[in-house]
Amino acid sequence: MTRMRQLFTGLLLMGVFILHAQSEPLSLEDCVNMALEKNINIKQSELDVQNAGIDKLNAFGNFLPTVNLTASHFWNNGLNQNITTGLLENVTTEFSSFQGNVGVDIFKGLQNINQYRRAQLNLLAQQYRLADMADDVSLFVANAYLQVVLNKEILTVQQKQIETTQLELKRTKELVEAGVLTARDLYELEANLATQEQSLVVAENNFRLGKINLAQLLLITDYENFEIELEDFSVPFPSILEKQPKEIFEQALTFRNDVKLAETNIGIAQKDLDIAKGALYPRLSGFYSYSTRITYNDRLVGSGTFSSIPLGYVADSGALVVREVEDSMLAGPLSFADQFSLYDGHNFGLQLSIPVFNGKSLSNAVKRSKVNLQRSKNLFSQQQLDLETSVNQAFNDSKGSYKLYEAALKTKNATRRAADDALERFQAGAMNSFDYVQAKQRYEAAVSEAIRAKFDYVFKLKVVEFYFGLPLEIN
């Protein structure tokens, strides 16, 4: 009973530990790593990499000789030609044959070498495609993560604003009772509180939807217990924005997987062209084969009885059989081993195949490969132009969003001072409630706008850093 209690306690503690581990807040880096591990499209791309590895093994196999073994057994019943004596006989004959073949390409227009090199490039291209997909998923997750943090901060601001308004409402009631303010002033504050409560409901809904969206990207179904770290987003002006876009672009060219993929595709197209040209050359191959057989017949022996007699059997003078092999050296039935050596054969040689005319299919394949090669070169150039455009746009967006964030901070500070002054004047009876609420709402809108500007800038900054090769993390 004690052991059962201990086991139950241990399982309970383990369950608590698992639940605690699952409820640990996730950082941006944790979310990115989880998405890369669970994303279905990435898993599909990983399978493409495995297939490319198998294709590489197939291409390597073209250098190896082909070896095939065959065996067969069949019966001839009735009037048939004996394959050994050439005589037509009305007998039941059984044959067991065995054959082995070996073939090897000696020269094939360098197609085997080019196919192997193409398989290597294709494997590399699939790896670049996988890495490029991982980059896209990382940016997508980072955007969803920052959206959740943004919604959380707006929700927190809305909650604090409601708390402040409730305190002001309580203070206003006291001033109304004291005759300093009128009931109209109280109504304005109550209307403002109702508006803030509506905004709070919207903020809560946006925060919840943002968490669900991020959780779905991470394939997490327990939305309620899913939490992220509320990291400190201090926003200094980063040194990377002091660089020139051309410098960031040149750095991106050295490691961006989409550029490497486009460049590798040029190599693949070049190998396709070499393979197509190789089909125009003569092909020389060598072959060797070995074959043997075992044969035996059902023949009439004595007075109406049948016996299975191996081929080469030399009958006694009193039996009703015919001599099968006219070889005086044979003195009895041949064993299987004897027949293997007696009926074996070797066949070997060289085969030369020269393409002369194939309805222009080979020359057209070469032309088509040249077109595909030029198309790959154009796509590579376009990929470089697209990257340069994306870097310039991300750089300018980041600098512009930083200036917008600075302006939003100035607006927030100015409206805060105006709201503080309006509150003092309102409580002193020198300002009516309508003007005070207007000043207060301008400040609240400025706070929300400053938060949005901050996170818009942070995400655009992360994009620029990502193009420069920096990891997606919050320092």
Image: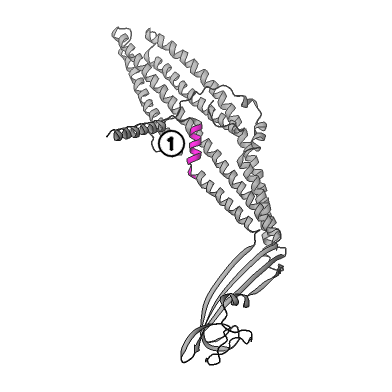
**Left or right of residue 407: residue 242:** right
Of residue 434 and residue 16, the one placed in the foreground of this image is 16
Q: Position of residue 396 (x, y in %)?
A: 60, 30
Amino acid at pointer 1: Ala
**Left or right of residue 107: residue 136:** left
Scheme of image coloration: one colour
Q: Position of residue 46 (x, y in %)?
A: 53, 46
Residue 472 is a magenta residue: no
Instruction: Pick out the residue farthest to the left.
Output: 1
* Residue 4, quarter of the rendered image: top left
Of residue 113 and residue 177, the one placed in the foreground of this image is 113
In the depicted structure, whether residue 62 falls above or below residue 344: above
Q: Secondary structure at mark 1?
A: helix
* Residue 179, quarter of the rendered image: top left
**Left or right of residue 29: residue 391:** right
Residue 32 is a magenta residue: yes
The secondary structure that most of the magenta stretch takes on is: helix
- Crowd class of label 1 (few under 14; some 14 to 19; many from 20; radius 10 Å): many
Question: Number of numbered discs present?
Answer: 1
Q: Position of residue 309 (x, y in %)?
A: 53, 83
Give the position of the C terminus as an image quadrant.
Answer: top right
Q: Position of residue 99 (x, y in %)?
A: 60, 71
Of residue 173 and residue 263, the one placed in the foreground of this image is 263
Highlighted magenta segment, given as a residue range: 29-40
Identify the residue under disc 1. 215
Give the position of the N terminus as an image quadrant.
Answer: top left
Q: What residue is rendered at 62% in x and 37% in y?
A: 389
Q: What residue is rendered at 67% in x and 72% in y?
A: 347
